[in-house]
Image (cartoon, helix red, strand yellow):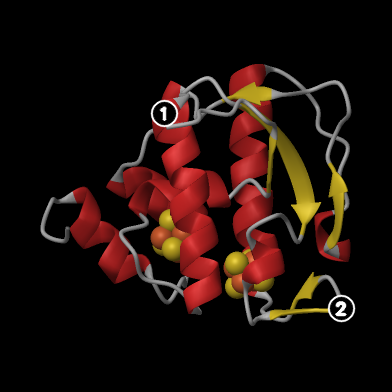
Amino acid sequence: MKTSLSTLHLRPHHLLCLQTFIGHGYSEEFVQEMTSVKRQLALNPGTPVQLVDGADMLCRHCPNCADGRCTSEKPALFDRLMADKIEKSEKISLSRTCESNHGDVFSDSFMLHGIPEYLTLSHDLLEECCPGCEWKELCGRVIDGNEK
Ligand code: SF4
Ligand code: SF4
């Protein structure tokens, strides 16, 4: 199987969603893209990840994305909370305009390599970064190993 280290362009909270993803999603196309990105990260845990402010490579396959923007209000909040966590942990300052949902990269110079350890999925992280998400119950069950 071909393994690619091509850079992933992801909005911050999708670093959590990818970990809880078990095949459910907004559409067949979206599920296929999530599956593909999750597989890339599993095969190459050090895959470069460029953080994106607003709609990312996954959003582009989501029916909730219109004119390059997410039509739901909550993801921008999840991104802000995740970006705060990344900033504190990496001791960096991401230039961002989360409210704008533009799909621009946060910062040209900053790159993650896969999903850092401090973003390893946990109930605490869900509580901290995903307030009011419709999928949270399912994600909690995935963490507990009660969903496969
Ligand atoms: S468009 Fe919105 S709902 Fe769809 S994947 Fe992106 S952030 Fe999530
Ligand atoms: S609770 Fe929502 S935002 Fe958080 S990881 Fe699950 S799907 Fe993603």
Disc 2 crowd, CA 10 A, few/some/many (<14, 14-19, 20+) = few
In x, y percent, where is residue 26? Answer: 50, 78
Q: Name the residue beneath numbered marker 2.
A: 67
Q: Which of 87 and 24 is in front in this view?
A: 24
* Vertical position of residue 140 compared to residue 74: above or below: above
Disc 1 crowd, CA 10 A, few/some/many (<14, 14-19, 20+) = some
Q: Quadrant of ligand 1?
A: bottom right
Camera-nearest label, 2 or 1: 1
Q: What element carries label 1?
A: helix
* Vertical position of residue 113 compared to residue 132: above or below: above
Residue 33 visible in the snapshot? yes
What is the C-alpha distance between the residues marked 2 and 1? 32 Å
- Give the residue type that dot 1 points to: Leu
In x, y percent, where is residue 65? Answer: 72, 76
Residue placed at 72% from the left, 55% from the top? 56
The circle drawn on residue 43 is 1
* Vertical position of residue 82 compared to residue 32: above or below: above
- Give the residue type that dot 2 points to: Asp
